Amino acid sequence: MTPVDSDEELTRKQRREAARAERRALEEAEAAGAARRRRLAQLGGVVAAVVVAIVVVLIATSGGGSSGKVQTGTKAVPLVNKVEAQLAGTTQSGNVIGRSTAPVTLVYFGDLECPICRDFSLGALPKLFQEQVKTGRLRIEYRSLETATREPEVFKTQQIAALAAGKQNKMWQYIELFYNQQGEESSGYVTEKFLQGLAQQVPGLNLSQWTSERNNPALSNQVATDAQLANNEGFSGTPSFLIGKTGGHLTKFEYTSLTDPSSFNEAIDKLAKA
């Protein structure tokens, strides 16, 4: 064999080895890629399972219900009893709950479709009823402020429905039953049937009188007055609060929690002792 032939043979051998090395590299890369894809698929499955679990929890514990359906018949009894127990031992007059002699007044601006207001009504408020209102230390005024309700006419109608119940001193039953059965925001659940259903749940409410009072111009004016008061205070969200000595100057109250009444109790205690 000539030197040239030897060199050519060496070159062919090198090329074969280089090709084998390249194939091995490609095979290893492909195997590594497949392993990564399997890991990603497994991770994706885990993530999907976690997401599903979170969604289920959020649906179960969300601020608003999914349907906004009023409970009827025996299904409504536990809810009505709960609200009645929370309000037992309190006095009402129109939109106010609590004794007129209470040293402290809390003005609560709310929208009946507001899910954050629902957090307050189901969280800190029942404890305030028990610890402050029933003991004669606090009176609460409910005022209307449109924030979550998308249609002004729907807002006006639902708030007037609550005020009409207040003409029989049962407004707080009505609004608490509303918040407890609040539907998903912007779902259009507030219909005449929904409002009528709430009224039928309120123990002792004269439905004929309630229906008649809903046409009272004074109630419509009250909703407009509440909005103007909120605007004067610079409120743009709900719930918003004013607090102060009863009959005196009220100032904005900044809460730290809507489920824990501690910040409310501290402010009330400070004013009551002043």
Image (cartoon, rainbow, N blue to C red):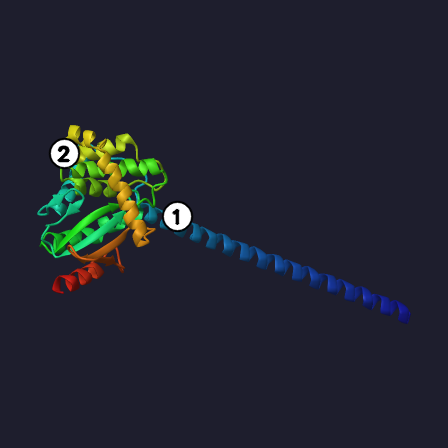
Residue 184, percent from left and from top:
33, 41
The extreme bottom residue here reads: 3
Image quadrant of residue 180? Answer: top left
The answer to which of marks 2 and 1 sits earlier in the sequence is 1
Label disc, if present, on residue 248 of the rendered structure: none
Q: Type of residue at label 2?
A: Leu
**Going by the image, does 192 lie left or right of 79?**
right
User: Which of 24/117 is in front?
Assistant: 117
The extreme top residue here reads: 208
Residue 178, percent from left and from top:
24, 40
Residue 263 shows up from this direction = yes
Q: Type of residue at label 1?
A: Val
Label disc, if present, on residue 205 of the rendered structure: 2
Residue 14, percent from left and from top:
77, 66
- SS type, badge 1: helix
- The correct choice, above or below, for 105 with respect to 183 in the image is below
Residue 230, percent from left and from top:
29, 50
Q: Around disc 1, counting alpha carbons within 10 Å, would you say few (fewer than 14), some (14 to 19), or many (20 or more)?
A: few
User: Which of 209/119 is in front?
Assistant: 209
What residue did someone put label 1 on?
52
Q: Quadrant of the N terminus?
A: bottom right
